Structures are given as structure tokens and as C-alpha cells.
Image: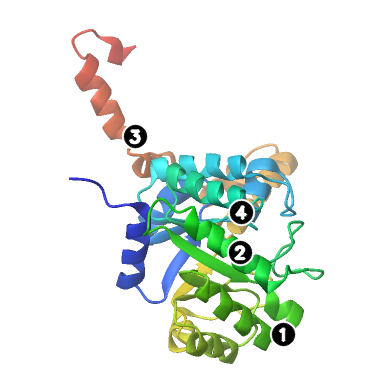
Amino acid sequence: MQKESAGARFWQALEDERPLQVVGTINAYSALLAGEAGFRAIYLSGAGVANASFGLPDLAMTTLNDVCEDVRRISYASDLPLLVDADTGWGSAFMIGRTIRELIRAGAAGCHIEDQVAAKRCGHRPGKALVEAGEMVDRIKAAVDGRTDDRFAIMARTDAHAVEGQQAALDRAAQYVEAGADMIFAEALTTLDEYRQFTAAIDVPVLANMTEFGKTPLFTTDELGEAGVAMALYPLSAFRAMSAAAMHVYRTLRSKGTQEPAVERMQTRAELYDVLGYHEYEEKLDELFAESGLAKK
């Protein structure tokens, strides 16, 4: 029996949970932890790739190949459907089509493409600049045309709210849906009423980005659900917490000469092994090589 595609699993998750919580996972192990916590869908942020994999700011300095490498690692480790940040698509029509095909091949369930200029910025920072709506429509058409799995979700992100205002964002979103976008990512909205306007006007699922320290308040899933929002995204929540914990350990080691004061905040070896299924791997080694004695060496 053929395995259901990643895209199909994403749509099923959206049926099973509203709003669907889509949690950021910067690497394969984070994806395993998200699964242990019970999430139904995960996310690879462009900022996550730039920050965590390359030590760079999210300023259009990573490529399709960079992102696909992290997608492959995550999708190999986890069956949770993975939504991917595809920035502006990394090129014009043919390149955007290739982007979609490569993401599908790497194991992604869907991606979002945005209407910023190629030299993009974080959606919650000043100085953003947009392409004309017609150019973004062409991006969406190229993405749809490049799709080799009809269930792969193509999401259009609009950053227009912060640049041109709410009505312009609504108008753009309507054009993107007409061009074939399956979903809308309404970036940097500031009130629940603004989300209500989107969900009332747009007849496809709408995503709300609950990134910390940005322009959007950290609404609860109940609040977002009442506003008609279909997906709540937490792109870098765990990464920020992990980074703060790591800095605490580094500073403790440096100042105390031992990690002992920080051990209580660490995941134990047993907990790590449980997530990885370590003992099952050992048992397989014993089963395969018991007669030769290699498993003991």
C-alpha cells in the first residue's frame, strides 16, 4: 500500500485540529521532540535555517539547497507533515517551479511564498518592501504549475498589512487565492478583528504567525479559533528557549568551572535515549550480530 503523501497528511492534520498548531523545528531532533509533545504538524523557518544552520541573520542569504538539506533531515526523522518557509521562491517562474518540485522531493508537506522583494526582511521588522501584486500572482501561478503532488499545500504570505495597510493586504490575498493559493499567511496583523476580516473575506484557510517579540500579540488558540483562524504558527519558540538554556549552561561552565549547578535544567541521558529509541537500536545490533560477537565490541 502506497504511503500517503506529506501534503495529504498536512491537510488531514488541518481537518483533525482547528486551529492547527504548527510548531517550529530547527532540526531533526526538534521534530522528534515536537512529536513526543503531541503536535500534528511542524515547521521549518527560513530564519531557523539561517540562524541555526548557518549563524546568519534572516536576510536572504540562504538558498533552496540550504533549506532542502534541513527539510531532508527533518522529514527522514519524523512523519509529521512539515510546512516550509520558501521565502520569495528564490527566482522567477522556472526557478519557483523547481523550488516546489525540490521541496516535495525532499519531503515537505507544503510551503509559503511571500510578496516581499527578493532582498527580503523579517516580517516583523521595519523597512519591508513589496513587489507589485501582479508579480506575486505570477509567483503563485508558477508554484502551482510546478507542483508534482496536488496535495502539496501552496500558501501565499502577504506582508502588505505593515506596508500598505489592512485593505491592501485583503485585496492582495484575494488575488493570490484566485491565482491558485491553497492557504493565506497574513503576516504581522495586530488585532483579532483584523484576523476576523481576513477569515470573513478569504475562502481558504488562514494562518496566524504567533512569533514572539513581534508585532502580533500572543493570542491563544481559543481566541484565534473564535476569529476563524485555521492555523497558529510558532516558528522559533523552542529555538529561542533552547538558545537561552544553552547560554545559561555555557555561562555556568565558564564562571563556575563545572556544569553541576546547571544539570537540573538538562535533559537526562535516559530521556535522550527514549526520544531516539536508542535501546531498540542496540537490541537490533544484538539480534544481527549476536553470533559473531560484533555487537559486544
Reading the chain from its start, which is encountered first: label 4 or label 1?
A: 4
Tell me the distance, in whole angstroms, between the alpha carbons under discs 2 and 1. Answer: 22 Å
Tell me the distance, in whole angstroms, between the alpha carbons under discs 2 and 4. Answer: 7 Å
Reading the chain from its start, which is encountered first: label 2 or label 4?
A: 4
Question: Label 2: few (<14), some or many (≥20) within 10 Å?
Answer: some
Residue 117, image x and y in percent? 74, 62
Question: Label 1: few (<14), some or many (≥20) within 10 Å?
Answer: few
Q: How many marks?
A: 4
Tell me the distance, in whole angstroms, between the alpha carbons under discs 3 and 4. Answer: 45 Å
> Which residue has dot 3 on it?
278
Hey, what amino acid is under mark 1?
Gly
Labels 1 and 3 touching (C-beta < 8 A): no
> Which residue has dot 4 on it?
93
- Residue at left offset 42%, top offset 55%: 109
**Circle 2 sits in a helix, a strand or a loop, which is it?**
helix
Residue 178, image x and y in percent? 51, 75
> Which residue has dot 2 on it?
138
Residue 177 seen by the camera: yes
| Quarter of the image with the N terminus in it | top left
Reading the chain from its start, which is encountered first: label 2 or label 1?
A: 2
Labels 2 and 1 touching (C-beta < 8 A): no
